[in-house]
């Protein structure tokens, strides 16, 4: 077991680890959670300017310098942050050591009220949210003193206390991690699940420790000379109760999990990827896997544009209101302009295409051309009411449950039709969407039997389900998911290619259903779904040819 340690110059914060005596240390996996950095720009009113301007209102240049300092600090631009202070070299060293020594990833620093003191110093209060890797978020408040310099510019008046009110020349912070013995975790058939045998489960197994409270630890304020604890600044993990000797039973299937881990290890080519497999009839999760295996559980907590796999939901919305039928001609030109130019993968075109052809060949322009058939909020309503997307799920571990916001304009509505714009999902969500399309009824995914049901949905009409199944089957036999065509079991599928950003390769998606199992896979920068996610799901479904017991 490894524990993060301080770099040699981390003199302002460091990490220690405590273990329970007489107990075998449990596995601890540091989950690297991606936290978006955000610095709130204080309004004129917050700065004391309005609605009635006062003589002692803070100078806007001083407030702007404080906000820029916070933005640089939060963004990891520590040289720039230091240059905004009265002691650049010292500030750079402290800021670097403070975050590294305490295993802090990307801080979120939010400016608040600004005031002016009698001597002209402007004080800008701020809230700091410091994500401590693998433990949680340390939140505290501090303030920045900003003074006018002889040349008329403003600088943050550097002191240790602005980083944290209790940081000083005599006291620093220490991060202590406490190993938590993990309970025995078993799959649906009583087979033991371990991080050694199933690497992708390491973060999940950690979350089952002490009833799911996760790892434990604390940030202490200690004397620099003696190391004696002066006070505790933050604690992580619940302390009440002890781990039960009773095994934690999950819905996972060791056979499916092993096959999922192997499929990702063998076929991703080093790219970040994740997949989820679950039962169609009840939403029970059979496997979740990530590459790399440790760290962020992108399979259930990732946020991705689902790309053309979302056309399952779009098709459902169109079929529900009779706006289109499989044999209707919808055409599929190379390009279609709706505020911006949209095109198909490899700029393909299918003149005179039917809706069935547009689905099986994943024609973006055909789906965008049908946007006027749906109201602005209709796609989101169908996603929520029939597929549960955007409702609050209680999976048994932390999860992201999707978002389908109302489009802001026609261009975003066009993008939403093909799973782009601001639509967000992950493999768990898209495996569930696939299961719902196959069965006609949403079942809240869960990893713990008998989980709490927190959603309310309506069943899809049988006529819609029949058409969705036929469209997905045709995508395997005659369309973009031919990579699965040689496998038995009447597999239905949908590929997806999701744009990420200009100059970066697209993410590749593939969702599939065989019998009572639905699966979804995304490969970051995979370019196409069939080419990147296709071999992964082919490997998985080949390794486990039958349904779970």
Image: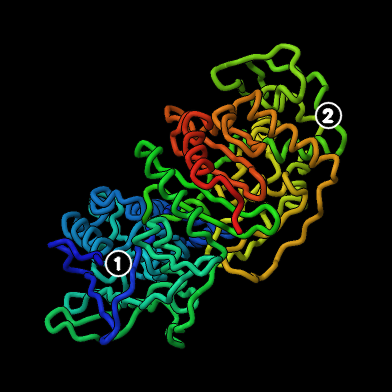
**Closer to the N terminus: mark 2 or mark 1?**
1
Q: Position of residue 268 (x, y in %)?
A: 40, 38
Q: Residue at x 25, y 61 (%)?
A: 100
Q: Quadrant of residue 271?
A: top left
The reply to whether residue 115 is visible in this rendering is no
Instruction: Identify whether 67 is placed above or below 221.
Output: above
Instruction: Identify whether 402 is placed above or below 417.
Output: below
Judging depth in this view, the residue of 431 and 507 nearest the camera is 431
Instruction: Identify whether 232 is placed above or below 63.
Output: below
The kind of secondary structure element at disc 1 is helix
Instruction: Identify whether 244 is placed above or below 134.
Output: below
Judging depth in this view, the residue of 391 and 516 nearest the camera is 516
The reply to whether residue 18 is visible in this rendering is yes
Q: Quadrant of the C terminus?
A: bottom right
Tell whether 87 sits left or right of 443.
Answer: left
Tell me the CA gap for discs 2 and 1. Answer: 60 Å
Q: Residue at x 43, y 60 (%)?
A: 201
Report if the CB atoms under discs 2 and 1 are less than 8 Å apart: no
Task: Say which residue label 2 marks.
Answer: 324
Q: Position of residue 407 (x, y in %)?
A: 69, 40
Question: Which label was assigned to residue 163?
Answer: 1
Tell whether 29 sits left or right of 274.
Answer: left
Q: Residue at x 16, y 68 (%)?
A: 11
Q: Quadrant of the N terminus?
A: bottom left
């Amino acid at each position: 077991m490894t524990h993060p340690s301080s770099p040699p110059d981390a003199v302002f914060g460091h990490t220690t680890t405590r273990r329970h005596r007489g107990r075998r240390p449990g596995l601890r996996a540091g989950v690297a959670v991606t936290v978006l950095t955000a610095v709130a720009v204080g309004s004129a009113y917050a700065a004391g300017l309005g609605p009635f301007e006062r003589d002692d209102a803070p100078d806007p240049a001083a407030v702007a310098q404080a906000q820029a300092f916070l933005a640089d600090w939060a963004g990891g631009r520590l040289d720039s942050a230091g240059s905004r202070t009265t002691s650049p070299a010292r500030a750079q060293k402290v800021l670097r050591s403070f975050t590294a020594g305490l295993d802090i990833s990307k801080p979120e620093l939010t400016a608040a009220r600004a005031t002016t003191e009698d001597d002209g110093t402007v004080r800008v209060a701020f809230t700091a949210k410091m994500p401590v890797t693998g433990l949680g978020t340390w939140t505290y408040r501090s303030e920045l003193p900003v003074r006018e310099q002889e040349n008329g510019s403003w600088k943050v008046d550097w002191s240790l206390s602005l980083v944290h009110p209790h940081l000083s020349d005599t006291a620093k912070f220490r991060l202590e991690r406490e190993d938590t013995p993990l309970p025995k975790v078993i799959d649906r058939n009583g087979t033991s699940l371990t991080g050694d045998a199933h690497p992708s489960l390491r973060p999940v197994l950690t979350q089952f420790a002490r009833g799911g409270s996760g790892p434990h630890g604390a940030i202490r304020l200690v004397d620099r000379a003696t190391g004696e604890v002066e006070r505790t600044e933050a604690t992580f993990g619940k302390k009440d109760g002890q781990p039960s000797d009773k095994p934690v039973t999950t819905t996972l299937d060791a056979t499916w999990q092993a096959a999922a881990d192997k499929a990702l290890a063998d076929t991703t080519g080093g790219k970040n990827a994740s997949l989820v497999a679950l039962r169609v009839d009840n939403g029970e999760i059979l496997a979740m896997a990530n590459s790399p295996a440790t760290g962020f559980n992108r399979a259930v907590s990732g946020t991705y544009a689902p790309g053309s796999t979302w056309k399952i939901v779009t098709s459902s919305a169109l079929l529900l209101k009779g706006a289109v039928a499989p044999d209707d001609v919808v055409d599929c030109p190379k390009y279609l302009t709706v505020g911006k130019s949209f095109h198909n993968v490899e700029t393909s075109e299918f003149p005179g295409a039917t809706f069935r052809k547009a689905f099986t060949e994943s024609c973006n322009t055909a789906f965008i051309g049908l946007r006027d058939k749906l109201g602005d909020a209709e796609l989101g309503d169908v996603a929520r009411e029939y597929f549960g997307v955007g409702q609050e799920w209680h999976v048994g571990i932390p999860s992201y449950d999707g978002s389908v916001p109302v489009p802001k304009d026609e261009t975003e509505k066009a993008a939403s039709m093909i799973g782009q714009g601001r639509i967000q999902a992950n493999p768990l969500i898209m495996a569930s969407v696939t299961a719902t399309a196959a069965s006609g009824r949403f079942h809240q995914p869960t990893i713990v039997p008998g989980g709490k049901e927190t959603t309310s949905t309506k069943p899809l009409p049988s006529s819609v389900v029949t058409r969705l199944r036929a469209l997905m089957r045709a995508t395997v036999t005659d369309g973009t998911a031919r990579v699965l065509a040689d496998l038995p079991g009447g597999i239905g599928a949908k590929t997806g290619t999701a744009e990420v950003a200009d100059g970066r390769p697209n993410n590749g998606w593939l969702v599939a259903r065989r019998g009572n199992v639905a699966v979804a896979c995304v490969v970051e920068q995979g370019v196409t779904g069939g080419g990147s996610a296709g071999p992964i799901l082919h490997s998985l479904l080949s390794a486990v040819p039958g349904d779970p017991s």
